[in-house]
Image (cartoon, grey):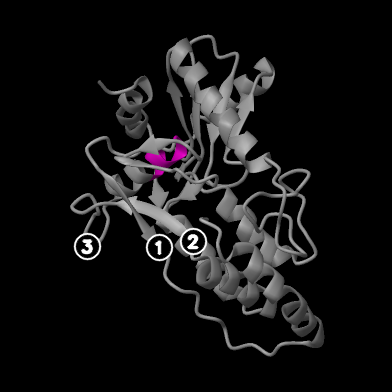
Amino acid sequence: MKSTTQLIIPLILTFMGKTNGFDTEPIMISDSKMDTIIELSTKQPYCNIRNNKDVVQIDIRFGDDDDTKLKIVSENELKQFIEICHQKVRRINSHGSFSFPGTKWCGPGDTARNITDLGRFSKEDGCCREHDACSRYIYAGDCRGGICNNTPYTRSHCDCDEKFKKCLQDLKTPIANLIGEVFFNIVGIVCFKEQPPCVQQGSKTEETLIDEEIMSYFNINDPACKLQYSRASRFQQSNVPIDSLALTIQRKQMYFLQCLFRNTNY
């Protein structure tokens, strides 16, 4: 039997507005009391919960705009969505024991105080923070889509890992190259993806894009679609000059990072 969340997804889809790729305008969800509203967005922090009734009423009035849609759900369904939002926030703000030197988000955990806290290498750290906010994941010890995550680390969807890789490559900095080398070539990140024939071939329709976006908000995969593990492709370093600071960091830290992660089932 499908869960309540899975059953409500098609209803939310009917209220979705225009989409451009995966960058959609906010979706607002509330119950008949309208004391609480959830605002879903593709931009951080992705999931906002508003409890102030005056603010909620203002948001609902703005929800009449063509680019923002309001969906009324039952009280129980709203509670389920609120819990999912809380889980996402906890995941983004969770603290770990190690991060790549000079960053606060690049590592098995994170050391950031909050979502706006970035390390010395802020651009590279921003790529890692965005990857940590991936909406498709399998927690340690959880199972979904026919596979289980028996490692102590969260597994992300391969699309998120590829986006992370591109973010680093586009920076064209020595530090981004070093982070990419460690995580993709030394560690060899394992991700998950849909098994064929679930993967859509050819160009995606607007309906398909909307469906994928809503499903990703609540980390739900098609129950008829099985998942499989895959190893992310190798990181191709950008051809950039290495300054003295970056070279010193590479020499002092590469061996340490190799020893730390070489035998890590990440």
Q: Amino acid at mark 3?
A: Gly
Estimate how packed mark 2 is, as few (under 14), some (14 to 19) or many (20 or more) residues with alpha carbons within 10 Å: many
Give the Cα distance between marks 1 and 2. 6 Å
Nearer to us in this view, 198 or 235: 235
Q: Amino acid at mark 2?
A: Ile
First reached walking from the N terminus: tag 3 or tag 2: 2
Q: Which residues are magenta?
A: 213-218
Q: How many marks?
A: 3
Q: Residue at x 70, y 62 (%)?
A: 100
Asked if residue 84 can be seen in this view, the reply is: yes
Can you say whether 10 is above or below 78 in the image?
Answer: below
Estimate how packed mark 1 is, as few (under 14), some (14 to 19) or many (20 or more) residues with alpha carbons within 10 Å: few
Which residue position is annotated with label 1?
231
**Residue 87 x, y percent position in the rendering:** 57, 31
Which residue position is annotated with label 3?
202
Q: Residue at x 49, y 24 (%)?
A: 81
